[in-house]
Amino acid sequence: MDDVLNSATRRDFLVGTAAATLTPLLVSETAAQTTDAPADAKLYIQPYLQNPTADAMTICFAALAADDVRVRWGKDKTALTETARLTSSAIPKVTWRVWKARLEKLNAAQTYYYRVDYRENGEERSSEIYTFTPFDPQGKEVRAVIYNDVHDRIATAEALVKLVKPSDFEFSILLGDMWNDPSVANNARQALVNLEAYVRLFDGSNKPMLFIRGNHDVRGSFAGQLSHLVDFPGSDPAAPFAEQKAYFDFLLGPCWFIAPDSGEDGSKKMELFQPYRQQQTEWLTGLFANSSERSATWRILLTHIPLYYRGFWDAAHSRDLWEPVLRGAKIDLCISGHIHKYDLIAKDKEIVHVVDKTKPDETTIRHTPPFATVIGGGPSLPEATVTFFTASEKQLRVRALDAQGREVVKFEQER
């Protein structure tokens, strides 16, 4: 772990030392060797935002030891007059707990201020004061940044975030494989270190982070518990894994985002993921049948495994089920990851790829994508990318930069 949390990172990690202020502390190496960390080895993750809509926002807070957790909020930084108690949720197989509060009846595009208060060993503690802004369905522009396939490599995320300015994004999208087969080992240490880093690096306390699962996120002994850390709309994190609905859609300004969950790659765990994909086929069919309720200039598909690619490692089973629905859905662009090689797949240009006969699935891939696909890079610095998304009523612009700041993928479309 020391190679990930170098001295500079560790200084950032241990920011703030006032007794009454929330301080994220890395669990000691001794504590990390046991499932139950001792009470004095505490790791806090600063509050973070989930599930934004035009009139609501979820505040999340994760800790090893805390009680009486509340969020105080309001429109004035000096007068946090509203209070909501966060609901506690124990995460199975680990000693962590997650608290969530859904703030509702908010005003779109209004700036709100909040802090999280809690008790520890009888002492009152508080986070810093953060801000959030509910989504504005009538907004003129959408700005987001997209990260994918970090695979636990925090150093890669640190390098990419240096290319991002606060004005570049209103929210971030974590487009799958941000975790690499998450495990409950050492009290899910690596999974929670990842979350702390993403909240801190992507400004998740002030700007929502939207998580879309990748194939490595659904593997490992902690995979089912990842849903406890986020707030998927309409999903019950305590439900059996096959019943956790990690797919959603949302409207923001001129954009309609549709985010299905492609699950595992290839033919892995077909008994689990094929019925899950079929469930999403019905969901997608319903969405587009009622698309007049979701009027938007741009329709953006977000899925970790690209439905169309030049090679073998694609989502054949998702494509077979979803293509009949998506082909007529007027999708303007798909944004994906998974391949670990940035690329741009053109619309309406036939792809023919002959697969090695030893491969278990398709031997020949032949398809004509009905929409373009931007594919982000992979976990190592030479292949990593950060993707910038900007859309107005007249223009859609997506570009991916590598870790050196060079533009390696560019997609533009105008109305």
Image (cartoon, grey):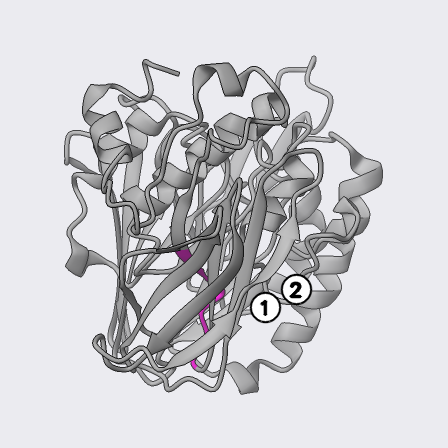
Q: How many callouts does the rendering have?
A: 2
128 sits left or right of 249 in the view = left
The numbered dot on residue 307 is none
Left or right of 68? Residue 201 is left
For label 1, count other residues whose C-alpha is less than 10 Å away and answer few (under 14), some (14-19) or many (20+): few
Point out the residue furthest to the right here. Answer: 271
Q: CA distance from mark 1 to mark 2?
A: 6 Å
> Which residue is located at x 66 percent, y 27 percent?
220
Q: Is residue 294 left or right of residue 165?
A: right
Which quadrant of the rendered structure holds the C terminus?
bottom left
**Residue 21 or 89: which is nearer the viewer?**
21
Q: Pick the quarter of the image with the N terminus.
A: top left
Residue 289 x %, y %: 66, 79
Q: Is residue 346 visible?
A: no
Q: Determine the residue positioned at 55% across, 27% down.
A: 38
Residue 188 visible: yes
- Are the residues tagged 1 and 2 within 8 Å (C-beta)? yes
Q: Which mark is residue 328?
A: 1
Residue 114 to residue 362: above or below: below
Q: Amino acid at mark 2?
A: Val
In this image, 272 relative to 159: left or right? right
Q: Which residues are magenta?
A: 48-54
Residue 84 x/y as whole percent:
49, 74
Which mark, by number, is residue 325? 2
Residue type at mark 1: give it.
Gly
Q: Badge 2: few (under 14), some or many (20 or more) residues near its Cα, within 10 Å? A: some
Residue name at image x 27 percent, y 34 percent: 14
Residue 144 pos. (x, y %):
30, 58
Identify the element where label 1 is drawn. loop
Whether residue 135 is situated above or below residue 341 in the rendered picture: below
